[in-house]
């Protein structure tokens, strides 16, 4: 019994150490200005995923990612940062702020005529509204996203939305 406990504790500590090394390495890559900008953004993106259970840290890193991407005019990276922010806000229970992030993403995607991106963001926003109990608005957004996926001929995307609708 004691041997199993020691083995389990050793495995947990080893995993924690590997996680710490990974996050330190990603942080170093992000902070090194000699690295290419997209490599730095990717490192920060991976760091956000690694700490996503800590909503405050993930949100803070996502803000840094957004500002850096905006400075470099990298729309796709900015959208990823906003998505991370929305997810962090949802973990903290701030649904209105998460919806505002989705609205900012939608505005950017609509300006760039990114129909697939709009459909994906509408689905995410609908899912959030559904979980918050706003079933009518969620249904409207799911159907709007479904129409876009159908127009794009994206059967897999349409199927995902239909699953969300229970069809």
Image: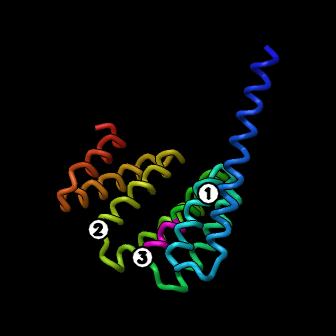
> Which residue is identified by label 1?
88
Decide which of tag 1 and tag 3 comes sooner along the chain.
Answer: 1
Residue 33 in picture, x, y percent from top left = 62, 82
> Please, what secondary structure does the residue beneath circle 3 have?
helix
Graded by Cα atoms within 10 Å as few (under 14), some (14 to 19) or many (20 or more), the crowding at tag 2 reads some
Residue pictured at 77% horizontal, 30% vertical: 9
Instruction: Name the mark on residue 108.
Output: 3
Q: Is residue 7 left or right of residue 42?
A: right
Residue 123 in picture, x, y percent from top left = 39, 54
Residue pictured at 65% horizontal, 67% vertical: 61
Q: CA distance from mark 1 to mark 3?
A: 20 Å
Q: CA distance from mark 2 to mark 3?
A: 11 Å
Graded by Cα atoms within 10 Å as few (under 14), some (14 to 19) or many (20 or more), the crowding at tag 3 reads some
Given the current orientation, which residue lies at the most extreme right position?
2
Q: Vertical placement of 89 versus 167: above or below?
A: below
> Which residue is identified by label 2?
115
Q: Which residues are magenta?
A: 76-82
Q: CA distance from mark 1 to mark 2?
A: 25 Å
Viewport quadrant of the N terminus: top right
Decide which of tag 1 and tag 2 comes sooner along the chain.
Answer: 1
| Circles 1 and 2 in contact, beta carbons < 8 Å | no
Q: Nearer the viewer, residue 58 or 126?
A: 58
């Amino acid at each position: 019994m004691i041997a199993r406990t020691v083995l389990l504790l050793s495995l947990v500590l080893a995993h924690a150490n590997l996680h710490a090394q990974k996050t330190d390495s990603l942080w170093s890559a992000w902070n090194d200005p000699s690295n290419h900008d997209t490599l730095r953004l990717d490192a920060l993106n991976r760091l956000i995923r690694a700490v996503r259970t800590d909503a405050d840290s993930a949100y803070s890193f996502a803000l840094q990612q957004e500002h850096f991407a905006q400075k470099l005019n990298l729309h796709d990276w900015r959208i990823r940062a906003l998505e991370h922010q929305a997810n962090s806000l949802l973990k903290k229970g701030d649904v209105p702020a998460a919806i505002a992030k989705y609205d900012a993403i939608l505005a950017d995607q609509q300006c760039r005529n990114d129909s697939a991106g709009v459909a994906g963001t509408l689905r995410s926003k609908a899912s959030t509204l559904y979980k918050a109990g706003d079933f009518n608005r969620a249904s409207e957004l799911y159907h709007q996203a479904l129409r876009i996926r159908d127009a794009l001929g994206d059967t897999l995307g349409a199927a995902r939305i239909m699953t969300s609708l229970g069809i």
